[in-house]
Amino acid sequence: MNYVVRSGDTLNSIAQRFGVPVQELIRVNNIAYPYYIYVGQKLFIPVTPTESPTSDIDRRLRRVENRVDALRSDFTKVDDRVDELEKHVNRLETRVTRLERPAPTPTAPPRPRPTATPRPTGTPRPTQRP
């Protein structure tokens, strides 16, 4: 279908009027950047848009689902990291607790037992009398 551009028309308004994506209008009419159109210009309007509203919704839904999956993955990574840090904190707390325990009181060293004095060799042993 052909359309003649009128005063006040924009690519967006034309695309919206006919339910066609703006990029499709630009593509099929070979409109170069900066995408100017002028009054009296004939534009070809594709009868069947390349993307129906349903497929646009599907595309957006896929994009949202992909983003949710990415966020879920990021959350899982962060959650795993938090678990690792909690284990590390628990180990550190255990070490601090051990270091803060009061030192055991020192015990007195054992006293040596008295021993018999050694006799010089060759000395007779005293005998006991009955």
Image: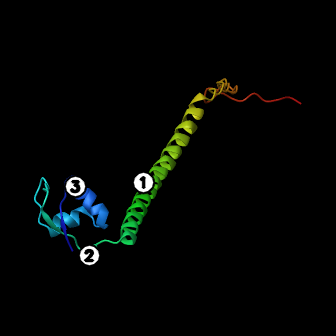
Residue hosting label 2: 47
Q: Earlier in the sequence, mark 3 or mark 1?
A: 3
**Closer to the observer: label 3 or label 1?**
3
The residue lying toward the viewer, choosing from 45 and 68, is 45
Label 1, label 2: how far apart the Cα atoms are: 43 Å
Q: Amino acid at mark 1?
A: Asp
Q: Residues within 10 Å of mark 3 (few under 14, many from 20)?
A: some
* The quarter of the displayed image where residue 5 is located: bottom left
Residue hosting label 3: 10
Q: Amino acid at mark 2?
A: Val
Q: Residues within 10 Å of mark 2 (few under 14, many from 20)?
A: few
The residue lying toward the viewer, choosing from 31 and 84, is 31
Residue 79 x/y as whole percent? 49, 51
| Res. 74 mark | 1
The reply to whether the C-beta atoms of the residues labelled 3 and 1 are less than 8 Å apart is no
Q: Would you say 129 lies left or right of 57 here?
A: right
Residue at the image point whose x is 40% and y is 58% from the top: 67
The residue lying toward the viewer, choosing from 69 and 49, is 49
Label 3, label 2: how far apart the Cα atoms are: 19 Å
Q: Amino acid at mark 3?
A: Thr
The residue lying toward the viewer, choosing from 65 and 96, is 65
Q: Secondary structure at mark 1?
A: helix
Q: Secondary structure at mark 2?
A: loop
